[in-house]
Image (cartoon, grey):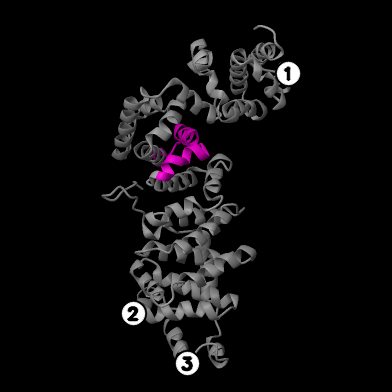
């Protein structure tokens, strides 16, 4: 599917994007079960008029359902939300949710049957549906929460002024669901995000939801997803990066640029490359100062030059690639060597790029590593302790040696944070280059000459 934007550059996402075979299968299995509506009426839980309205639509779908509901849409909206508020039996709630979803399927205009309820109660129509997403976090019945989340998404997408409170609660639910062991539930939750985030006014709500971005990033970095899930998650990042504040902070907080470039380099599906490049374009357009150095550190210009020489079935890919390449060529010369070095260091992907081997670089920039309570020096120390990559270990050890030569007074601090001990351990590392650079740096740390 080609990515499209509206005239003001805001992402347009199809409303009916939430389509999940797992949920559809559950729905089919539950649809035919009888519900004791007459018993509810005899018990005075519903009125005779409500019973008549229910019986008029029970077991109807498609055009048969439309002929009945569209005559009194607002009545049915109020009825069904009211039933969710006052009935509690699981099979009944399931049946009501199926009926609401049937009403909304391929008919986004019917969302108004429910949204008009906010005129008399600001919590409606969302609160009864949100109740079932939050309750089902502690229940074995996932169907109710999944179906309710799909309905909530449709209502939020259709609203001219979506409820930020409802969006916040829905996003807390999706964040929890992204930890599910059931891939189908994760897939549905990501689809919810793809649709809901089309609303500009709730993108920052998602951005500010605790652990929300972490959960999405984790899918890309830890779960090793297939091409379709890669596409869906990056699609969410693409939509989010239309917001300038998010574009400013996304890579700084979550280091996504190296991951996105790695995914594009190894992608087989064209649409995965397409959405990565579109996201990177947003980052350059909305927040160049925040993102260009990180792009330089992962050699994005060279990669974009490679992409521009390929043949693409989607012409928009080449347009975005050429735009990205032009912007990188125009702006990279304004970056200082230290900015590129810092971006590389913060990405945790050290290579033997020119700054690491340049005496002039270290003479000019060593003091930068002292700033903010030795923040960058601490990053090097962390890489020594956590990385398993021989090149990263070699470069980090070398950088620490270069720094200590300019600041001998830092030896005590480096010993306190465990660097000296780690360097000593790396002197027996199986990789020859790691051993060599560790030995050199050890001489600086103990006071000898390299």
Residue bearing the label numbered 2: 67
Pick out the residue farthest to the left: 7
Closer to the eye: label 1 or 3 = 1
Residue 390: image quadrant is: top right
Question: Would residue 427 appear left or right of 47 to someone viewing this image?
Answer: right
x, y (%) of residue 211? 56, 50
Residue bearing the label numbered 1: 424
Residue bearing the label numbered 3: 48
User: How many residues crowd mark 1 within 10 Å: few (<14), some (14–19), many (20+)?
Assistant: some
Residues under numbered marks 1 and 3 in contact, where contact means CB atoms less than 8 Å apart:
no
Q: Is residue 269 above or below residue 10?
A: above
x, y (%) of residue 146? 53, 63
Sequence-wise, the earlier of marks 1 and 3 is: 3
Q: Is residue 277 above or below residue 447?
A: below
Q: Is residue 75 above or below residue 431?
A: below
Q: Is residue 210 above or below residue 165?
A: above
Task: Using the numbered discs, state the Cα–Cα distance from disc 1 to disc 3 in whole angstroms.
Answer: 83 Å
């Amino acid at each position: 599917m080609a990515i499209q934007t509206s005239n003001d550059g805001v992402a347009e996402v199809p409303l009916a994007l939430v389509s999940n075979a797992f949920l559809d299968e559950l729905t089919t299995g539950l649809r035919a079960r009888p519900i004791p509506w007459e018993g509810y009426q005899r018990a005075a839980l519903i009125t005779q008029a409500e019973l008549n309205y229910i019986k008029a639509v029970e077991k109807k779908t498609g055009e048969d359902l439309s002929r009945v509901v569209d005559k009194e849409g607002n009545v049915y909206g109020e009825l069904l939300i009211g039933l969710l508020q006052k009935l509690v039996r699981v099979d009944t709630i399931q049946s009501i949710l199926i009926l609401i979803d049937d009403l909304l399927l391929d008919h986004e205009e019917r969302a108004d049957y429910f949204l008009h309820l906010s005129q008399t109660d600001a919590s409606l129509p969302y609160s009864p549906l949100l109740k079932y997403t939050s309750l089902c976090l502690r229940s074995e019945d996932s169907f109710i929460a999944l179906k309710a989340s799909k309905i909530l998404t449709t209502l939020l997408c259709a609203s001219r002024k979506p409820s930020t409170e409802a969006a916040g609660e829905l996003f807390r639910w999706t964040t929890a669901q992204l930890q599910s062991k059931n891939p189908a539930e994760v897939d549905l939750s990501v689809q919810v995000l793809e649709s809901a985030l089309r609303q500009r006014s709730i993108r920052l709500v998602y951005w500010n939801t605790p652990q929300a971005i972490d959960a999405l990033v984790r899918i890309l970095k830890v779960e090793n997803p297939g091409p379709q899930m890669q596409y869906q998650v990056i699609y969410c990042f693409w939509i989010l990066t239309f917001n300038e504040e998010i574009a400013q902070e996304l890579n700084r907080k979550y280091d996504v640029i190296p991951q996105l470039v790695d995914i594009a380099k190894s992608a087989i599906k064209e649409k995965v490359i397409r959405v990565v490049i579109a996201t990177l374009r947003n980052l350059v357009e909305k927040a160049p100062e925040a993102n260009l150095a990180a792009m330089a550190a992962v050699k994005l210009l060279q990669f974009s030059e490679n992409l521009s020489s390929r043949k693409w079935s989607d012409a928009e890919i080449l347009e975005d690639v050429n735009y990205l390449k032009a912007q990188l060529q125009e702006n990279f010369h304004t970056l200082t060597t230290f900015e590129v070095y810092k971006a590389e260091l913060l990405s945790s992907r050290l290579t033997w790029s020119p700054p690491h081997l340049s005496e002039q670089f270290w003479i000019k920039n060593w003091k930068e590593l002292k700033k903010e309570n030795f923040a960058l020096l601490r990053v090097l120390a962390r890489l020594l302790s956590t990385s398993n990559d021989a090149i990263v270990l070699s470069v980090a050890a070398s950088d620490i040696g270069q720094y200590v030569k300019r600041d001998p007074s830092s030896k005590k601090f480096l010993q306190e944070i465990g660097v000296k001990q780690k360097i000593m351990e790396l002197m027996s590392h199986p990789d020859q280059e790691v051993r060599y650079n560790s030995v050199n740096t050890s001489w600086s740390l103990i006071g000898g000459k390299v």
